[in-house]
Image (cartoon, rainbow, N blue to C red):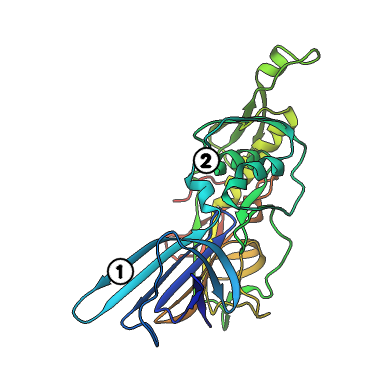
Amino acid sequence: MSVVLKVNGTDYSGWKTASVTRGINQLAGNFSLSVSEQWPGSSLPTVGAGDECQILVNNTPVITGYVDDVSISYSATSHEISIKGRSKVADLIDCSILVAKQYTDEKIERIAEDLVKDYGIMVVTEVETGEPITEKINVGESPFEAISKFAEMRGLIITDDPEGNLVFTRTSENRASAALINKPGQTNILTGSATLSMRDRYQTYRCISQTKGDDHNNGEAVAAIKEEVQDQNVIRHRPLVVIAENAGTNDACKKRAEWEMANRIGSAIEISYTVNGWEQSSDALWVPNLRISVDDDFLNQSGEFVVSNVTLSVGPGGATTSLSCVLPESFTPKAEAPDTGKISPNSGSVSNVGGEEDVR
């Protein structure tokens, strides 16, 4: 198993520690590498902050981007260098839009292409993004902020790919080649944990939007378009108002409210696992946006989840993969609310509580 940093025409491997993270709930993949003592067979790597780079895991590209930080330290007995970096799309998070722009009846992906073209980033559209929109982009916004507003209105995921492209997608139907199992006498999991929360769930989700009037639609009809949905499993009075990111119709407002509720319901349950190695049973690397079956007696979790984040790591203990898994509803605009559970303070197990809204 190997992690290779390609930079300035040179391949560097043999890292003391390495971690590479990609996910569908974050835009930019990132990496962290370190080596100490004498670089195997040579001197320490010559890498500068800002250098273009690529990370390969087992000869497979996983991140294309730039070196963010290079840290060098030494003592009387050792010296060490650590290198951190992110995908090319990180510039869309860090940087600002310099000129306000007005887009009229444009597809979301066409707007994104215009906003990212100066960064040398391509836009990949894996799913239908919906009808064209009309929207103004403000000075000072980051490209990521502007694009994410449109994506949220349509329930889209924006992430990166191994080439550093910006990707519009949804939860994939691709499945992991094996389930995650923790049962008496049968397990393929090193460690597991669950977090269940009602902190960010609400009873009522109301989306409010405004749109321009015309000869047929004006006055109250366009002054404050609003739609709301209910989470039947939250019994307390807990309303949340969501202001639509751009002008929209009643249908768009309804979908935005559904997306907000579904995302919060799905995010209320997160399970994390660590497994041996970097590859699935099919020998393919673990990647985000895989559907995976979970059968965990200790956490009392059984069913289908989506792998939201993957971290491939290597260190003194060998190679491992950390998987963050959430319900598919985290990324899919559905109005139906699944039940949540709570962790028993005595046994550490998870029990279904149906309509209860508090985790104590």
Local packing at callout 1 (Cα closer than 10 Å; few below 14, some 14-19, many 20+) is few
Q: Which residue is drawn at 56% across and 51% down?
A: 267
**Against 41, is 170 above or below?**
above
Q: Residue at x 44, y 59 (%)?
A: 50
Q: Image quadrant of residue 162? A: bottom right
Q: Image quadrant of residue 333? A: top right
Residue 61 or residue 304, whichever sits in front: 61
Earlier residue among tags 2 and 1: 1
**Against 135, is 346 above or below?**
below
Disc 2 target residue: 142
Q: Where is residue 33 in the image (x, y as percent from the top left)?
A: 42, 71
Residue 72 bears which disc, if any?
1
Q: Where is residue 341 in the image (x, y as percent from the top left)?
A: 55, 55
**Against 120, is 30 above or below?**
below
Q: Is mark 2 on a helix, strand or loop?
A: loop
Q: Is mark 1 on a helix, strand or loop?
A: strand
